[in-house]
Image (cartoon, grey):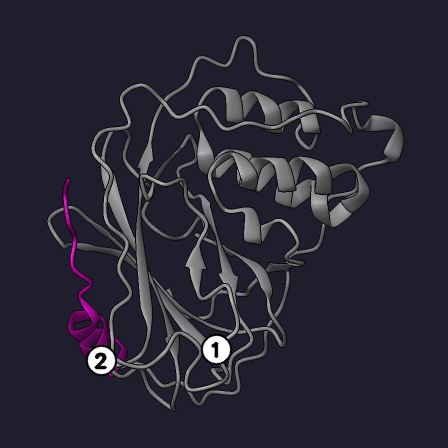
Amino acid sequence: MLSIQPRSETVFTIICSVSLLGGIVPAYAMPNSVGTEQLLALDHQQFSFIPPEDSGQPRTNRAGGRRDQFCNNSMPTPSLTLLLPPTNQGLTTAAHPTFLAYLPQTSAKQAFLTLEDEDDNYLYHTIFELPAGAGIIGIPIPDTAPALEADKYYKISLAMICGQVLDPNDPVVEGWIKRVELDTQSRPSQEISLELGAWYASNGIWFDTLQTLADLYEVEPDHAIAAWEALFRSVNLDDMGAAVFLGNVNNTVN
């Protein structure tokens, strides 16, 4: 098993050159316009994520820093979590994917996300404002960032900033993503549908499954929530099923 240690000190070095006091205002992605009549009648679809056969060895996700996971607030459960299967890695077909994470109730106002390759070369980093309250957030990688290359692993690091600047002791979690090419001949044509989410899940494409259900959750939550809960149960993330989706955050530094 490959054990990857967090690199909080490196993240700290980068963030020190970035001002966090610029009056950043959070913004959330507007949902796509999808009518109820366009949604497929799959309300009882039992989503079960099927891991890809060549997923490789599990990659360890360990929290860095010495603070608790809530910036010294009370200790609710669950803690800061990147939403990933048990292997702590996931596939995507997107050049610029969106990462989903569970945010606990916290005193932190901002967070810092980095994306780097297996040789520790930084591809992208961003600071964003945290919404009030606990729930699931989406962190999109913008089209202006370098595209993920196919068949390469990239490490995702997400840190909560407990003070005015990032500190090596701030909590950080890590995971891995790999971009793949997929035969789309059997892909459902509707961009936001339970059928499309189920198709991604059955093909082992984790991040695209999450993104599809998150998009659907924003426009028709009643159609998405059962599939959302079933998907999380299938990868032992049961305690995430009841979490509210708070929307996509606004990246402020590229």
Q: Which residue is drawn at the image coordinates 14% and 54% (left, top)?
A: 120
Q: Circle 1 sits on which residue?
A: 75
Q: Which residue does the numbered mark 2 point to in the structure image?
A: 168
| Residue type pointed to by label 2 | Pro
Which of marks 2 and 1 precedes in the sequence? 1
The stretch drawn in magenta includes residue 3: yes
Q: Is residue 204 above or below residue 242?
A: above
Magenta-colored span: 1-16
Percent from the top left, x then y, of residue 85?
40, 40
> Cα distance, mark 1 to mark 2?
20 Å
Amino acid type, callout 1: Met
- Tell me, yes or no, whether the two marked residues, 1 and 2, touch with CB atoms within 8 Å: no
Q: Nearer the viewer, residue 242 or 56?
A: 242
Give residue 247's quadrant in the image. bottom right
What residue lies at 55% left-to-right and 27% top-to-bottom? Answer: 48
Q: In the shown orientation, is residue 250 left or right of residue 42?
A: left
Q: Indicate the secondary structure of the residue bearing disc 2.
A: loop
Image quarter hosting the C terminus: bottom left
Local crowd size for mark 2, using a 10 Å CA cut-off: few (<14), some (14–19), many (≥20)? many
Q: Residue furthest right?
A: 37
Q: Is residue 7 above or below residue 192?
A: below
